[in-house]
Amino acid sequence: MKHTLKVTLLIVLIFFLAQMVGLVALNYNTLVYEEPETGEVIVHHMDTAIGERPQLEGVSTLVYILIAILIGTGLILLLVRLRKVKIWKAMYFFAVWMTCTITIGVFIGPTISLVLCFILAVLKLYKPNPWTHNITEMFIYAGIAIIFVPLLDIFWSVVLLLAISVYDVIAVWKSGHMVTMAEFQTQSRAFAGVVIGYKEKIKGKFPKAKTKAKPKERTETRNAVLGGGDIAFPMIFAGVVMDGLIRSMGFTKPSAFLMALFIPVVVTIALFILLYKAEKDKFYPAMPFLTAGCLVGYGLMLAVNLLL
């Protein structure tokens, strides 16, 4: 097991809660009504607390996301090379502020959410602790999903999952730049994702000067991390599926939400299996496993729907 069972379960719990926050916010952000003249069901997503979404759809959205990821990756790697921690923290602060505002703005007014999320971003960056860091993570990726879910359909969201999975494998096992970025962000105390620090007792022989080596224990501080993309992309897929159930299959908002829960439940199980089977001190691309969980969850959802 990569981490202790307690830490593993905590990461999995935070991941699942983040998925739930995203689906609830997306469901709340959706308006469903019937066109009086044609009887057509219209699914409308309200504007975000920081403005309108990009005017994109389908393949254009896919290209937009992939280009944004490549540009963002290149910029972060440049900051890593130049050791510009302050610039990274400024970018991180702004991203946390805006994405949290989008999520919380679904439920309350934009002005209040802007002020509240500014305070949360300040606490997250300048008064960091496990609570503020990981709780705000639950709202960050829901904000990203609220932006992009209305711009995608099932086909292009699956293509997005597959493309990100391939990229993740290359970035972790081939080029290794994902590991470099994760280490830089962790050291700067501005990690984009879940972070849980814990102490672990290491058994072994730790000899001291002028004494015989004896079996002893020492305590090491370790960090268990889960990247933000690993939270965001399954959430986007689940949101697109929920949207499709309402738009194309005639589900109500509550029933679509319940059916879409198959995806986060199965993806959470996939994440647990990955963390349970993973070896210590080795890095793994999570997205291929999470993508498999998304597709299996989607298949189960369709099967159950056929049986009902």
Image: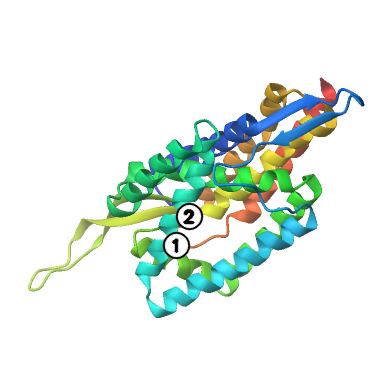
Q: Extreme left residue here?
A: 210
Residue 126's image quarter? Answer: bottom left
Q: Is residue 169 above or below residue 147?
A: below
Q: Is residue 3 above or below residue 301?
A: below
Q: Is residue 215 above or below residue 146?
A: below
What separation in Å lies between label 1 and label 2 (alpha carbons)? Answer: 6 Å
Residue beneath disc 1 = 91
Which quarter shows the C terminus? top right
Tag of residue 95: 2
- Which residue lies at the image location 56% right of the left edge and 42% below the top edge? 142
Q: Nearer the viewer, residue 19 or 204?
A: 19
- Which residue lies at the image location 78% right of the left edge and 45% below the top edge? 154
Q: Position of residue 145 (x, y in %)?
A: 61, 45
Residue 25's image quarter? Answer: top right
Q: Position of residue 149 (x, y in %)?
A: 68, 44
Q: Is residue 58 visible?
A: yes
Q: Position of residue 116 (x, y in %)?
A: 39, 39
Tag of residue 39: none
Q: How many marks?
A: 2
- Which residue lies at the image location 57% right of the left edge and 75% below the top edge? 175
State if disc 2 and disc 1 touch (CB < 8 Å): yes
Helix or strand or loop: what does disc 1 sit on?
helix
The amino acid pointed to by label 2 is: Ala
The amino acid pointed to by label 1 is: Met
Residue 298's image quarter? Answer: top right
Callout 2 crowding tier (Cα within 10 Å): few <14, some 14–19, many ≥20: some
Helix or strand or loop: what does disc 2 sit on?
helix
